[in-house]
Every structure is written in C-alpha cells, then in structure tokens.
Image (cartoon, rainbow, N blue to C red):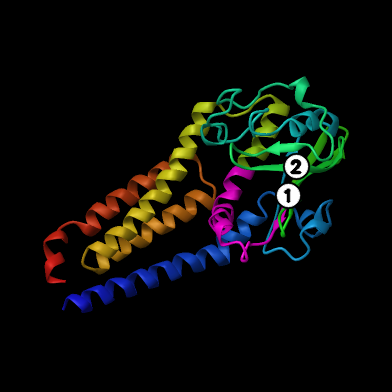
Amino acid sequence: MMKAGILRRILGLFVLNSIIIGAYILWARPYQLRWGATLIEINRSMPGDERHGNPSFLATRGITIEDTPENIWPWLIQMGYGRAGFYGYDIIENLGSERGIFSADSIIPEFQHFTEGDDVPISPLARLSFYEIVPNKYLIWSEDKSEYPGAFTWALYPLSNNKTRLVCRIGWSYHWKEPSLLPLDLFTEFTDHVAIREILQGVKGRVEGHFDSFGRQTVEFFIYLSAFLIFIFAQILLILKPLSLRNWLANLFSGIAWLLTWYAPLPLWIGTTLCVLAVFGLIYGFRGTGKAVSKA
C-alpha cells in the first residue's frame, strides 16, 4: 500500500509538471522571448549577432520611448552594478552596491565615457565587458573568456523626430561542457525576461519622467517571488501528502498562477489575488490529508 501511494504521488507530480512545462514551452517561453518586439525587430539582424552563431537562448524585446536616441543613450551607457544600477528591481539588483540600493534617477557624468574592453559589473560576482560601443546607436556587452561568449545588445532605432525604439537582444548557449554554470543558465532561462522587461520600462520611465517608485517595484518583486514559492511548496506537499484529485487540482492551479503572474504580465492586484487564491486552494486541497499519510 505504501509503495502504491508513493507511485501515485510520483505519477501525479509527473503529469502535473508535464502540463506546466508544456504550457511554458508552447506559450510562456515564446511570449517572454519576444516581449514588446515587432516581427520586423525579431527577424532583423542586429549588432552582436555574430557573437553567438546558433544560440539556444535568443531573445528580442523592445519598447517605444518618447524621445530621441541622443537623450536615451546616457541612461544606457551608465548602467551597471555599482554604477547607475539597472532601473529595475533595485531590492535585488543593487543589493550591497556601494552607491546604495536605488538606481539612478539622473545622468551621472562619471559613467558616460566608457570604451570597448571596459568592464560592465552585473552583480558582486559577475561582470561582462563592453564589446562594442557606437554612441546614440548601440552598445554590446559580452564575455570574451567563455567558450560561448554570446552578446547582450542594446540598440536605438529612431521612428520620428521624438520617438525611438529601444530594442534589446540577448543570445547565448547553454554551458553543457561547464556543469557548474548550468544553474546560472537555468536561472537566466526562467527569470531573464522579468529583469529585462523592467529595465526597458525603467529606461523609458526615466527618459519620459514618470518611472515606478521603489515601493511599487519591491511589491511587484515579492509577488513574483511568492507565486514561485507557493508553486514549489505545493509540489512538496504533493510528495508528502496522500494524493487526491482535490489536492492535485489545487497544485495545478498554483502552477497556472505562477505562469500567469510571471509571463502574462498582470496588474499587481491580479497577481496578488492569484497568489492568495493559490494559498487558499492549497489549504482546501490538502485539508484533512495529514492523518492519512501513514495509510498511504
């Protein structure tokens, strides 16, 4: 009986994750790799493409900014950990920075004059370098030491006298021959879009003068984190508790809530509501199953 119960839980977990992974591959991943980008931008070649050849991860994202490339460029060139920040989720991206937790809300003259080969600190532990800089047009971050250097391109495309497209393209391949780097690859695979989306919106907001507050960004970050942790906790419960249709469906809902919260994206109140509903769903789904553990 105990082995049969364990097998049912394993099968239930397998079917559940197959559905979630399928939804990620068919819907969430294609959407996040092309967030905000037009078909022309997705199919157009960009500076830096030659760095990654045939990448396993290729993302093109874009946003329209009401200003000229000349006024947007200073915000791009000064980005970096310990510099201007990344205009995104400061509570995690600027943690420990000597310049403080907040990304810059003005142009910093000392970070405007970089040349190709200069470092770009990404975090306390990671850094890239400027591979190519063409002022008011594009800049490329890359890693020369890796077998798979890839490229991280920020490019400006004028649409009119006072309207510009900021397009970001990232291309890299998994480090199959360097297993120690695979956890970082997976982290990038699933979280890169959250950071880049917020960076693009952060640049736009600063240029146009209406960027999000630190408080709102922090709340949004914790909603994302909560949705993910609720889904992980739900799967742990599914392993530990006897399997039933009720708790399996509650687990499935927590997975759907995670996907929608991370990849839709949704307004804060909807994301919060989904997280709350997922918690109550788990309470209802697993209520009264504890006593049956020993019988499973």
Local crowd size for mark 2, using a 10 Å CA cut-off: few (<14), some (14–19), many (≥20): some
Q: Is residue 270 visible?
A: no
Classified by dominant secondary structure, the portion drawn in magenta counts as helix
| 292 or 128, nearer to the observer | 128
Q: Amino acid at mark 1?
A: Glu
Secondary element at tag 2: strand
Residue at 61%, 66% in the rendered image: 176
Q: Which mark is residue 93?
A: none
Q: Earlier in the sequence, mark 2 or mark 1?
A: 2
Secondary element at tag 1: loop
The quadrant holding residue 79 is top right
**Residue highlighted by disc 2:** 129
- The image quadrant where one finds the C terminus is bottom left
Q: Is residue 42 visible?
A: yes
Residue at 67%, 30% in the rendered image: 205
**Residue highlighted by disc 1:** 143
Relative to 201, 246 lies left or right: left
Relative to 79, 123 lies left or right: left
Q: Which residues are magenta?
A: 170-196
Q: Are marks 2 and 1 in contact (CB under 8 Å)?
A: yes
The quadrant holding residue 87 is top right
Residue at 75%, 34% in the rendered image: 76
| 232 or 277, nearer to the observer | 232
* In magenta segment, residue 96: no
Local crowd size for mark 1, using a 10 Å CA cut-off: few (<14), some (14–19), many (≥20): some
